[in-house]
Every structure is written in structure tokens, then in C-alpha cells.
């Protein structure tokens, strides 16, 4: 009898949400019934979510994909000889040749969907831990030089140069330093952190270990939002493996260097994605924002020098160390170097993860990759950068994804999430929601955010109720003035950026607020 | 999970709390993990145990209460046996989550944030489950579901109720 054929069914939460477990069970049952030996691997997701559950089969020509597969399709797939790559209406051909995937530049997500995320052997076989090995050889200064040279900027949204943060912490003298990973990915329209943690968790562990070597930290924390139970399970398992195999602990790979990594679960507070609020939460306190300075790099967790980076920033470090800063920097444009894992979400026909060099335009993403809206109606607006990002109209769809280009149009790239809305969207309702969300999630420390968000919600409700009765310049002026106060006087980005979605909605879609396009332009 | 009967169950709460506190003895800043562990085991953080936690961590009761009440996750009484969280964030709204929520609330006779009197079902809002390319999304007793409509959700709730 020939050796068993390997079949891949993703374990990623999005794939599970569409029935991947049922499909996996059906494949095992059908194989048993037909007396065929199959080796089932629960891989990560490729991030082509409109095709999930995406089943792959290893063939001599390469991995062949079928999707979206339902449990009911499994019998038919066996009949069609899918184990030999046989033709079927769900057949997609060789996975690597799927246009959406083929046109990406997968650096940070090089392994996602290919490997078994829980297998250290798989990770190492696919170039894992090469970055750490080089880091151990070259030492702190050279590690930081590589990260500086790569041009990597914080992928959480603030886009601060990662290498400079690391250099600051390395330059501090302290008995204890910390590496903190911000895995509180609360922005609607984002899931790239979740995918790293579920689909390739070792890359995050490796990135944090390299950061620790670079700055001389011996303790690390991952602050993970509680809404991600699958990521928690994957990290718990892989951290234990890393300890058992000498990749974490008191003597990393026999180098005598130590790094201990702890996983902490958040508790449903959006504001804890703000770095100082996150540190408060890690210390066991209310997640209230700290004034800056002092910067966390100088006085962070428990008052000690702390590197706090987003998941994607840290997960991009291993490939930078492995292939060199120059290799990474070769991607991108201007001062936005490397790649950005873009998340195409909401009302979109082909939603998913698109890792591309900076510079791709919204229009390419929405139509060439995304295939237009899911409902088939025209796309009216997109919100980029989460709940604190601006709403952009069709006239701005040619903007390249680049930190500076977005800043120039009063928008932000943030964590790379794009939420698509068709022409049924009511932007005044979305603006009110932005204020409502800010009111729900405000930590309460500063007045502009705590009170301003509630006043803003009330004001927008009044505008919505009265908008059919003609212009209401008084309320619009008041709303602008309130936004100005929140923008200028809030302690952190929650209150300080909630005006972005509100004002962009008002400026680009004035008709939804009872303001005529002409009147808006005249002002 | 049965509704907590404060007085009869007090010894059990205290025993669980003491065990959890002991398990986190040497951990710095451990209040959140402590609260999570208690809630994972009891379904809630009963107000009766806050004094015990405060004493153990050398904090005031007010400080512990301040932390418990700050975070949306911590609850004073357990949720319904079937616990449905519906995402209300932007990506799900772009795929009709508001209308879906309104219709579901009507069909279930329950508003977001409410639990049925018999403790059978809790309906709750959640802001992003990280499943934004498969909106609208819901979390049912810890299981994630994507591209759901009202019929799917009613079937899933029924299925869960039958299982329990």
C-alpha cells in the first residue's frame, strides 16, 4: 500500500467559523469508509477567506486547493479523486498559482497556511528560527542596526521606527527590562495579529526573543485580547514547546542568555490597545492611560525600560534578521518600507489577508483583489485604520497605501484594516457610532474623551433626527468645535482620533448630514 | 450554569478564590489573571470574594472593585447557559449587523445585554471578533460563527440548548 496522502484543513478561527472542523471530520470519516489512508494536517489559513474552508491536497505537482468546501461536498470530492488532484467544481488548481495569493509579497506571513502552526519541526523546516540563530551570533548592537536599517515602523498604527525604540531601551541601565507584545487587536476590520498568533505563532515568539537579546530584557509578556480564544490556545501550546526545546528559558539554545515569556489575557477593554493603558492593565490595574512622557521605553512596565511593540512588528523581525535589513527595505516606497499585511474586510466579495509592499492603491485592493462589494452594489466608502480611521470616498481610492500619503489626505493607515461599505451605508449613522464606541470604551481619565464622546453622540443623534428638515449650521459648527477639542486635548488616540471618522464622514458625505454638497464646498 | 446563590455558595467561592490566589502567589501584577481564573471556574466574579482578593494582594477593596468594574468581561453573576455574543463593530455593520441584531432581539424576545429569567440564554454585544472578512460574526459559547443570518443563529441557539 502506498504512503498516506496529506490533506490540509485549516484550524484558523475564520475557517472554523465557516465549518472547517465539520469538513475535517467528514474527510476522516469518508476516508475510513473508503478504506483510504489519509494524513490530516490542520494548517493555518492562507487568508483567502472567501474560499474558506480551503482544503488542500499534497500532490507530486504541488498542493492543490478546493474551496469553499462544505462537509456535504466531501463525498463528491472523494468521487472526483481529489486525493490525486482530480477535477471538481470546487477545484482551484495549484494553491500557489491562485492569482490573489501569487501577486502578494509574503514576508511576515511566509509560512501562514503552509505549515502546521503548532509544529516546531515544521517551523524550522520552513526557515524558522534562522533569525534567532543569527541574532545570537551578531549580538545586541548589530541586531538593532539590522532593524534600524530595515526601516521597520510600528505596525500597530503609530508607525514609530521600531529600531529607535529598541535602541532607547538598550541604552537604559536597569536591573530589569521587559518586552511587551501588544496583541490587543481591537480594531474592527483587522485580524492580521490574530492570524500570526493562530497560523504561525512561533514567529512571534522568535521575534520577541530577538527583541529581548537586542535590548537586554529577560522577561516578556504577550497581552492578548480575550476575544481571541483560538490564539490563546495556539500560543499556550507553542510557548510550552519553545520552553521544552530550549528556545525559551534560562539558556536559549545553549547561549547562556535567558528569556521568559508570559501570556496574559485582556478583559474586553478596547482602550488597552493603547500602550500605556495596556501596561497599567498588565500591572493589574484599571486600564487608564498614562500621560507621556515618560515614554514606556524609559519607564514602562513596573516602571522599568520596556519595548512595547505590536504583533506584526515583532513577527517581522525574524525575517529581517535572517535575510538582512536591506532585503526587507527593498520593498515599499518613500519612508514606508517593507510590507504591510492588509486586511480587506466588510462588504467585499473577496475578503482576506493581502501582504503587499507599501504603495499599492486602495482601488487595486478593492477591485483587482477584492472584486468589488459582496452585495454587488457600488462601493460608496471605505474606512481604513480601524474605528479611529477616516472614511474615504471613491475620489480618494487612488491613494497609495503609504503612511505619508494617507496623512496628506487627513487619513491614517493604522493597522492596515480596510472596511468596505456599499451605497446603502449612512455615514451620519457611522459617525454617531464612532462617538458611541468612544463613549463605551473611554477609560475616563481625560475630559475631552469621557464627556466629549457622549456629547458628540447626542449631537449626532439630533443632527440625524433633524436632517430632513434642512440645514442645521449651528449643530454642524458645534460638532466641528467639539471634534477640535477632542483632537487637541485628549490624552490618547481614542479621544484624539475619534474625530477622524466623524469629520471625514461629514466632509466627504455632507448630504448624509443634511448639508448640501455646494454648502459644504463653500465653507 | 446555575445562578449563583450568594450565601449558600459562599464557602465554595472562598475556597476557589483561595486556590486561585495561591496559584498566582509569586506573579507580579496578577490581578487580571486572578479574576479570569475565578470567573473561568465560577462563571462570574462574585462580589463577596473581592475583600478576600484585596486582603491577599494588599490592596483596598475599592481598588479591586475599580478593576473589576473597569473591564467589560468581568461579571457579578454567571451568563445564561447559552451565551451568544453578536458583533456590532463596523465590518459587521457593513454586512447588515444592525438589522440582524434588531430582528434577532425581536425573535428571541431579548435585548443585547439581557439574560432570560430562567438563565437559559444571554444575548450580548461584542466589538470585533477578528473575523471581519466573514461578517457578520457571532460567538456562541466560545465557538466562532461567520457569515451568519437570523435563521442560522436561531438554529445554532436551538442546537446549543438541546445539547445542554
Image: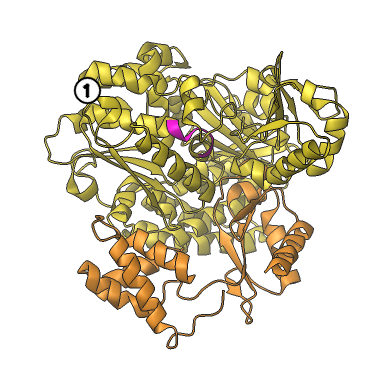
Chain colours: A yellow, B orange
Magenta segment includes A199 = yes
Q: Say which quadrant the N terminus of chain A sits in.
A: top right
Residue A218 found in image quarter? top left
Q: Is residue A17 above or below residue B71?
A: above
Left or right: A509 with respect to A482? right
Magenta segment includes B71 = no
Residue A258 x/y as whole percent: 24, 34
The span picked out in magenta is A198-202
Residue A237 x/y as whole percent: 46, 42
Residue A51 found in image quarter? top right
Left or right: A114 with respect to B67? right
Q: Is residue A230 above or below residue A441?
A: above
Viewer-proximal residue among B94 and A180: A180
Viewer-proximal residue among A30 and B84: A30
Identify the residue at image location x=33%, y=32%.
A246
Q: Which residue is the extreme one toward the front?
A: A1
Left or right: A355 with respect to A276? right
Viewer-proximal residue among A240 and B70: A240
- Residue A495 shows in the view: no
Residue A398 found in image quarter? top right
Chain for mark 1? A
Left or right: B18 with respect to A78? left
Residue A231 x/y as whole percent: 50, 44
Dot 1, crowdedness within 10 Å: few (<14), some or many (≥20)? many
Location of mark 1 (residue):
A140
Identify the secondary structure beneath mark 1.
helix
- Residue A460 shows in the view: yes
Amino acid at each position: 500500500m502506498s504512503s498516506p496522502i496529506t490533506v490540509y484543513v485549516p484550524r484558523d478561527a475564520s475557517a472554523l467559523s465557516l465549518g472547517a472542523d465539520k469538513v475535517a471530520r467528514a474527510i476522516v470519516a469518508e476516508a475510513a469508509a473508503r478504506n483510504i489512508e489519509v494524513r490530516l494536517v490542520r494548517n493555518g489559513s492562507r487568508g483567502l477567506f472567501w474560499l474558506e474552508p480551503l482544503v488542500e491536497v499534497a500532490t507530486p505537482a504541488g498542493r492543490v486547493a478546493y474551496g469553499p468546501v462544505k462537509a456535504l461536498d466531501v463525498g463528491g470530492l472523494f468521487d472526483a479523486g481529489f486525493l490525486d488532484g482530480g477535477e471538481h467544481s470546487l477545484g482551484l488548481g495549484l494553491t500557489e498559482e491562485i492569482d490573489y495569493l501569487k501577486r502578494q509579497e509574503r514576508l511576515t506571513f511566509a509560512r501562514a497556511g503552509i505549515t502546521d502552526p503548532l509544529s516546531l519541526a515544521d517551523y524550522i523546516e520552513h526557515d524558522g528560527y534562522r533569525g534567532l540563530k543569527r541574532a545570537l551570533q551578531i549580538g545586541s548592537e548589530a541586531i538593532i542596526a539590522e532593524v534600524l536599517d530595515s526601516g521597520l515602523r510600528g505596525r500597530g498604527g503609530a508607525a514609530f521606527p521600531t529600531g529607535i525604540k529598541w535602541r532607547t531601551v538598550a541604552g537604559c541601565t536597569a536591573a530589569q527590562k521587559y518586552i511587551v507584545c501588544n496583541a490587543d487587536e481591537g480594531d474592527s476590520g483587522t485580524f492580521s495579529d490574530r492570524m500570526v498568533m493562530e497560523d504561525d505563532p512561533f514567529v512571534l515568539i522568535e521575534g520577541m526573543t530577538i527583541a529581548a537579546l537586542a535590548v537586554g530584557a529577560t522577561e516578556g509578556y504577550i497581552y492578548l485580547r480575550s476575544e481571541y480564544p483560538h490564539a490563546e490556545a495556539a500560543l499556550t501550546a507553542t510557548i510550552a514547546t519553545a520552553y521544552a526545546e530550549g528556545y525559551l528559558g534560562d539558556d536559549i539554545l545553549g547561549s547562556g542568555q535567558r528569556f521568559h515569556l508570559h501570556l496574559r489575557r485582556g478583559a474586553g477593554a478596547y482602550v488597552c490597545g493603547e500602550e500605556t493603558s495596556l501596561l497599567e492593565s498588565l500591572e493589574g490595574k484599571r486600564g487608564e492611560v498614562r500621560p507621556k512622557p515618560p515614554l514606556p521605553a524609559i519607564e514602562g512596565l513596573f516602571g522599568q525600560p520596556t519595548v512595547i511593540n505590536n504583533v506584526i512588528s515583532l513577527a517581522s523581525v525574524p525575517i529581517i534578521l535572517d535575510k538582512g535589513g536591506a532585503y526587507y527595505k527593498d520593498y515599499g516606497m518613500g519612508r514606508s518600507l517593507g510590507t504591510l499585511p492588509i486586511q480587506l474586510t466588510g462588504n467585499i466579495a473577496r475578503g482576506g489577508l493581502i501582504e503587499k509592499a507599501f504603495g499599492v492603491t486602495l482601488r487595486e485592493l478593492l477591485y483587482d483583489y477584492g472584486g468589488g462589494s459582496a452585495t454587488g452594489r457600488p462601493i460608496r466608502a471605505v474606512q481604513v485604520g480601524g474605528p479611529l480611521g477616516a472614511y474615504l470616498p471613491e475620489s480618494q481610492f487612488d491613494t497609495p497605501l503609504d503612511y505619508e500619503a494617507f496623512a496628506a489626505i487627513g487619513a491614517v493607515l493604522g493597522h492596515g484594516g480596510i472596511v468596505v461599505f456599499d451605497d446603502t451605508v449612512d455615514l451620519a449613522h457611522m459617525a454617531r457610532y464612532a462617538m458611541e464606541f468612544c463613549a463605551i470604551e473611554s477609560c475616563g481619565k481625560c475630559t475631552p474623551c469621557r464627556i466629549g464622546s457622549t456629547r458628540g453622540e447626542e449631537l449626532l443623534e439630533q443632527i440625524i433626527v433633524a436632517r430632513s428638515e434642512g440645514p442645521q449650521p449651528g449643530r454642524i459648527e458645534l460638532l466641528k468645535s467639539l471634534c477640535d477639542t477632542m483632537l487637541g486635548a485628549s490624552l490618547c488616540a481614542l479621544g484624539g482620533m475619534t474625530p477622524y471618522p466623524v469629520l471625514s464622514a461629514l466632509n466627504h458625505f455632507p448630504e448624509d448630514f443634511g448639508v448640501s454638497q455646494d454648502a459644504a464646498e463653500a465653507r | 450554569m446555575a445562578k449563583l446563590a450568594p450565601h449558600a455558595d459562599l464557602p465554595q467561592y472562598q475556597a476557589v478564590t483561595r486556590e486561585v490566589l495561591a496559584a498566582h502567589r509569586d506573579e507580579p501584577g496578577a490581578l487580571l489573571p486572578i479574576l479570569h481564573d475565578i470567573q473561568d471556574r465560577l462563571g462570574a466574579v462574585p462580589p463577596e470574594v473581592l475583600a478576600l482578593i484585596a486582603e491577599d494582594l494588599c490592596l483596598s477593596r475599592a481598588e479591586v472593585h475599580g478593576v473589576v468594574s473597569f473591564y467589560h468581561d468581568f461579571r457579578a453573576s454567571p451568563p445564561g447557559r447559552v451565551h451568544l455574543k453578536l458583533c456590532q463593530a463596523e465590518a459587521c455593520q457593513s454586512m447588515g449587523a444592525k438589522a440582524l441584531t434588531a430582528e434577532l432581539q425581536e425573535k428571541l424576545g431579548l435585548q443585547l445585554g439581557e439574560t432570560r429569567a430562567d438563565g437559559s440564554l444571554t444575548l450580548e454585544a461584542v466589538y470585533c471578533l477578528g473575523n471581519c472578512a466573514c461578517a457578520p460574526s457571532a460567538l456562541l459559547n466560545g465557538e466562532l460563527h461567520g457569515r451568519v443570518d437570523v435563521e442560522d443563529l436561531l438554529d445554532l441557539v436551538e442546537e446549543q440548548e438541546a445539547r445542554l
